[in-house]
Structure formats: C-alpha cells, structure tokens
Image (tube, rainbow, N blue to C red):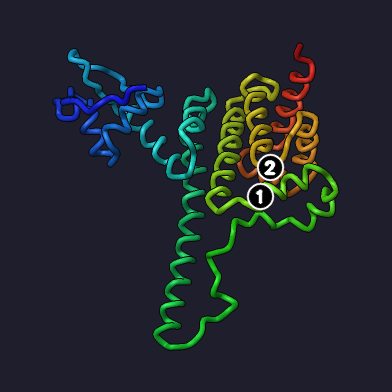
C-alpha cells in the first residue's frame, strides 16, 4: 500500500469547531503521517472533508484519538484497539476508569523504582552498601505467582498448568500490564451490559464471554469451551473470584458465569 504523503492540508484553515490534520497532529503531538495511517486503516476517520478534500476532525474525533493513544500507551496493538473502541458494548467512562487504575499501578511502580534509585545514590554518597532487603523494591515482576502454590496443588499435573507455566515464564512486566488491561476491559464491558439490563445469554454477552475465552487461550493455555465453562463455575464458587467481579458490578460473577455457559452451549450446538 502506498504511503500517503503530507499535503498542504496540514496548514489549511479549519471550519468552526473543526481541526485540520495538521492542527490535530500538533494538539496530540503525533505526526501527520500517523493520522493519515489511522484514517487509511479505518481506526480514526475524520468526521468531515472540506470541498478540497482536506481532512477535518471534530470533537468526537479528538476524543476517539485520545482513547487510541491512551490504549497505545498501555501496550495495545492497533488491531486490538480497533476491536475495543468499535465494540457495541464499549463504555468509554468505564474504560477510562479501568485505564486510570492501570496507570496508577504503573505510577506506583515507577515511584518505587525512583525511590530505589534514590537509595542507591544515597548509599554511593555515603560509601556504604545498600540494604539487601530493599535493594530490589520496585523491580519485581508482576505478581502472577501470588497463588502459585495453590494452583500447582490443584492443577499441577494438568497439561494446561504446564503450558501456562511455559508461557508465563517469559512474560515481562509490560506483558502482564497488557494482559491485565485486556481482562479489565472485558470485565468493564460485561458490567456495562449488566447495568443496562441485558440478558446473560444475549449475543453481546456471549461475544464478550468468547473474547474472554480467547484471551485465556492466547496468553495462558488452550482453553476449550468446556474448560471455560469449568472456570465459570469457579467464578461463583471461589469467594476471591466472586469478590473480584462483584466490585465491578453487583451480580456480575453470576452474570459472567451464565454468559460463559450460554456461549459454550451455543458453540457446542452450532452446526
């Protein structure tokens, strides 16, 4: 595909409430080429075009661009971003809340790393070794081993456990941030459906259940619909999982379980 070259549109005057591609590039601190690319792939298509063909972006376009750039900052690829922002159940407010929490976690970790650097500098100035009990604070991997002993005891002999261990050993902190962001996004959209009064067996809920299954399949282990149904039972049987979902919406754990079971049944009975 031929890369579209920058044209005088970058400097063309905008209409009332509208911005040219050059103005948007300056506002968002991205390149005009980036905006052209987003337009070509359908990720961010300007609301209007001037008579001379120049791109004109409205406020809604700027909001969408901000979501795109925020999700890019959180480590998502363009394909994943397109699926999220175009999803029928996408709730921008809930997405922003989830993204804020992820950014706060990142901020907290960065602050701990900076504090560790300060301690290292202080130790150098005082010509003494650092405290070994605190010298690695902030540099720990994402806490994916929190329940490792229990998981090993319950599922350690299964192929799924072995495959999950094989994959997760190579994941970085950035990987875990993305994994959590994807999971939180699905949960937020499910909570939005529940709040809207949607049925757990509705198409939208089943599609989110399927997206969740694929998330597990992609990052952890091959997850069949039967295995996913088994996980659904655990979401309401294990208080820790139930609490996790209930914080995001009263009744969400049961709603999620029903959506997963409905999706599994429909896929099983599909011709």
Give the farthest residue toward the front.
Answer: 2
Q: Is 27 on the left-hand or right-hand side of 215?
A: left
Q: Mark 1 points at which residue?
A: 168
User: At 82% from the left edge and 48% from the top edge, which residue is drawn?
Assistant: 155
Q: Earlier in the sequence, mark 1 or mark 2?
A: 1
Image mark for residue 220: 2
Helix, strand or loop at label 2? It is loop
Give the quadrant of the N terminus.
top left
Residue 28 lies, with reference to residue 120, above or below; the image says: above
Residue 253 lies, with reference to residue 145, above or below; the image says: above
Q: Is 232 on the left-hand or right-hand side of 31?
A: right
Horizontal and vertical percent position of residue 109: 50, 60
Give the quadrant of the C terminus.
top right
Residue 129 lies, with reference to residue 2, above or below; the image says: below
Horizontal and vertical percent position of residue 235: 75, 40
Q: Is 119 on the left-hand or right-hand side of 252?
A: left
Total numbered circles: 2
């Amino acid at each position: 595909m031929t890369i579209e070259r920058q044209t005088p549109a970058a400097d063309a005057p905008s209409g009332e409430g509208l911005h040219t591609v050059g103005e948007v590039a300056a506002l968002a601190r991205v390149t005009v080429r980036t905006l052209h690319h987003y337009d070509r792939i359908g990720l961010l298509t300007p609301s209007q075009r001037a008579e001379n063909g120049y791109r004109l972006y409205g406020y809604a376009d700027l909001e969408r661009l901000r979501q795109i750039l925020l999700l890019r900052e959180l480590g998502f690829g363009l394909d994943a971003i397109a699926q999220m922002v175009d999803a029928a159940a996408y709730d921008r407010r809930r997405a922003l809340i989830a993204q804020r929490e992820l950014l706060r976690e990142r901020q907290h970790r960065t602050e701990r790393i900076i504090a560790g650097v300060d301690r290292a500098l202080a130790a150098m100035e005082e010509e003494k070794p650092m405290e070994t009990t605190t010298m690695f604070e902030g540099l720990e991997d994402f806490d994916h081993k929190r329940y490792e002993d229990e998981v090993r005891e319950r599922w350690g002999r299964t192929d799924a456990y072995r495959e999950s261990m094989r994959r997760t050993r190579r994941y970085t902190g950035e990987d875990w941030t993305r994994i959590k962001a994807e999971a939180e996004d699905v949960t937020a959209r499910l909570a939005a459906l529940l709040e809207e009064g949607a049925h757990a067996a509705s198409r939208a809920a089943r599609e989110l259940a399927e997206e969740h299954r694929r998330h597990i399949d992609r990052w952890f282990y091959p997850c069949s619909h039967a295995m996913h149904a088994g996980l659904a039972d655990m979401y309401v049987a294990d208080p820790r999982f139930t609490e996790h979902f209930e914080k995001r919406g009263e009744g969400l754990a049961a709603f999620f379980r029903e959506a997963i079971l409905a999706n599994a049944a429909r896929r099983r009975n599909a011709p």
